[in-house]
Image (cartoon, helix red, strand yellow):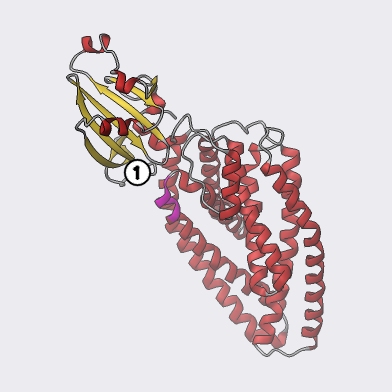
Amino acid sequence: MRIKMQVANLRFLLRDDAIIRVLEEDNLPYKKQRFLLFAVQKNSKLELSKSAKSAVSNALYFLEYSFSLNGLWYIIKSYDFCDTCVLEVRFNDAREIVDFIMPSMLANHCGENITNDERYSEINLALFGNPNYKSDFNAVIKRAKLCGDFALLTPGQLSNSLGAKIALYGVLENTNIAVLDFLGKKNTKSLKKLIFALDKNYHLCLCCDSGFDEQIFSSFNAKFCEYLALANSLGEQNYLCDYMSAQNIESKSLKELKKERNIAEDELVLKLGDFSSVLRDFSVMLSDESDFYSGEHGKKALKASMALKLQNAIKNYENAPNTSTKSALKESSKHLYHALCAFGQMYNAKLSAKLEKKLLAILEIYAHCDKCEFLAKSFALPQMEIINKKLLHSAGDSLKKIAKKHAKSIKICQEFWQILNFYH
């Protein structure tokens, strides 16, 4: 969805902000102001406001330099983050526009006339960023390697394929770290980090699949799913053994369980050796600057494509309790959480972070609930009846908490849904 701008006077794209130095060198008096504006929804329309209330975009921050020259008023706007600089010339009447010649001191810095180009309206800059933004692919991938997992904030119109590569590369780096950490320590904490990293990789692959070749991409995701299942299985055996030891539950079966856990751990360690080569291949694919791995929708705008993906994730999250089982709600919560962590801040950082926090709280309760239910199932013996009841009671309380938190999060989901409507 592009927002049309009202044509008034003339506007030119500047090549850079060096023109500011020209004003200073020529001792031309000018007024400097700072602005922080948001695209906000008002009466079903969008307008710019200093207030973030009802904002449907992140902040548009810019410096404005205004000055008078030859009887006309000139305004230079240097937009931070989206790397855009615009010169606006304001006229007293229509005849002056016809006779206008750009002063030579400014002409050398002016590019194309964007007076009628709605992409450069301030509302569209707030929503979509610089339409001519050229991403340095290698620099972006280098940043992803250095930072590991980071939220994707786009200063311009990234393609679906490139945006997905950036987000996935960040997660890939964290997965590599988690694998090495687990192989070195092989304890409960390192296993938990590994499961989280694999889970995130899996869900982000589901978000980004339309940007890549379907056959190649699905083969990688199948591998992530396979190793995630192995890690989850070991995780269950870990906390069963740990719980029995902590509760001083001595039984012959505990020794057998520990043996089974050790076997499962050895199997995962062995598999992770092969997984390292899978991660390397995935890294090669993401690092490729060509379109070889791109899918049918790879060149579409990331913001538009991901807005629809996020809306689908919100819809599944909202409908899961009424149409599906408890596990479906858990999976839809995970999927929406990971999608928001990677892409939500492109649209509205504050609201996205608020929804992420709600979803994380739900997922943490689910983790406790799943643990209790698994342990109760494992202790389904007459001599374990008291422990079994306590575990099931705790799981029941957790489900009630999830229901309440889910209901409260729906309102935030609906707000975010409305924002996403403006991006496609």
Q: In this orientation, does residue 163 appear?
A: yes
- Range of residues picked out in magenta: 348-353
Q: Residue at x 53, y 70 (%)?
A: 398
Q: Looking at this rendering, what residue extends furthest in the front direction?
A: 25
The local secondary structure at tag 1 comes to loop
In-front residue for pair 296/148: 148
On screen, residue 200 versus residue 277, left or right, reads: left
Residue 294's image quarter? top right
Q: What secondary structure prevails in the magenta region?
A: helix
In magenta segment, residue 349: yes
Q: Amino acid at mark 1?
A: Ala
Residue 108's image quarter? top left
Q: Residue at x 54, y 50 (%)?
A: 342
Q: Position of residue 368 (x, y in %)?
A: 58, 71
Q: Residue at x 61, y 41 (%)?
A: 138
Pointer 1: what residue?
A: 55
On screen, residue 84 versus residue 9, left or right, reads: right
In-front residue for pair 29/339: 29
Q: In this orientation, does residue 7 appear?
A: no
Q: Where the N terminus falls, by quadrant? A: top left
Q: Residue at x 64, y 55 (%)?
A: 173
In magenta segment, residue 183: no
Q: Position of residue 93 (x, y in %)?
A: 19, 14
On screen, residue 167 versus residue 409, left or right, reads: right
The image shows residue 69, relative to residue 362, as above or below, that is above
The image shows residue 129, relative to residue 11, as above or below, that is below
